[in-house]
Amino acid sequence: MEPLQPSDSALIDLYLAGREAAFAQLLQRYQARVYTTIHLVVRDEDLADDLTQDTFIKAIHTLKSGRYQDEGKFGSWLCRIAHNLAIDSFRRSKRAPQTSLDDNTGLANSLHLAEESADDALGREESHAHLRQLIQQLPAAQKEVLLMRHYGDMSFQEIADATGVSINTALGRMRYALINLRKKMAAHTLLYDSNLTPLNVASLRVQRIAS
């Protein structure tokens, strides 16, 4: 049986008491999630690395200043900082964030596909290319939630905290993203995964914190 890991609150207390290694554990625990949150917006690896570092530096300053209020949501708080830094960065660059989706991950990889012949494989690549284009056409807020959910592996509560909206708003954006994506896919005769674009999209209204 693996030993219990210390909670975020315990690690924060240890760090503020002078145990630098405690923050290193927090860094290890959340670095990937923070990086993903940023990269989904800026779509630049070097910039995402820089902003990830900035996120943790800002977190350190807030902790040491005594301005951090521990409500048991340290990870969501970090993602909120990361999201704000990413949005500020892309606004300064005066360009909309671009999304480059990996053919073999996330939504593109979830399409229902039979065993492939050479023709099947070609058709799959064409479907993936169309899917990437269709996702780009979604409204920015809907696309952001969809990417955070399926590529960032974030819960709806974490998405709500990171984007500064209520969980119902996050759920609503996801619902409309799925509706719009499904309509676009149907119009382009693309196959889709019913688990990602459920027939009863209204069920998203009653979903709560999911991971």
Image: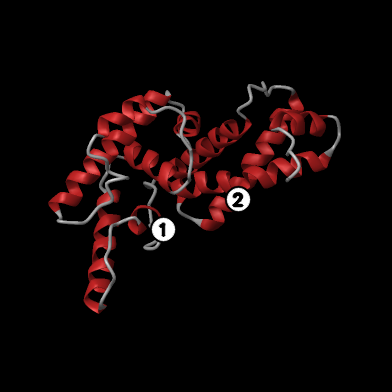
Q: Residue 122: percent from the left, percent from the top?
A: 25, 73
- Residue 105: which numbered mark, if any? 1
Question: In this orientation, which residue lies closer to the viewer: 21 or 42?
Answer: 21
For image coordinates 24% across by 66% down, the residue present is: 126
Question: In this orientation, which residue lies closer to the viewer: 179 or 130?
Answer: 179
Instruction: Tell me the SS state at disc 2.
Output: helix
Q: Residues within 10 Å of mark 1 (few under 14, many from 20)?
A: few
- Residue 89: which numbered mark, if any? none
Instruction: Tell me the SS state at disc 1.
Output: loop
Of the residues shown, which amino acid type is indicated by label 1?
Thr
Of the residues shown, which amino acid type is indicated by label 2?
Asp
For image coordinates 22% across by 41% down, the residue present is: 180
116 left or right, relative to 25: left
Task: Please identify the residue farthest to the bottom as the structure is shown.
Answer: 118
- Closer to the N terminus: mark 2 or mark 1? 2
Tag 2 residue: 50
Q: Residue 118: percent from the left, percent from the top?
A: 25, 78
Measured along the vertical axis of the image, is residue 156 above or below residue 45? Answer: above
Q: Residue 5: percent from the left, percent from the top?
A: 73, 39
Measured along the vertical axis of the image, is residue 110 above or below residue 114? Answer: above
Give the label, 2 or 1, closer to the camera: 1
Q: Residues within 10 Å of mark 2 (few under 14, many from 20)?
A: few
Q: Quadrant of residue 66?
A: top right
Question: In this orientation, which residue lies closer to the viewer: 177 or 86?
Answer: 177
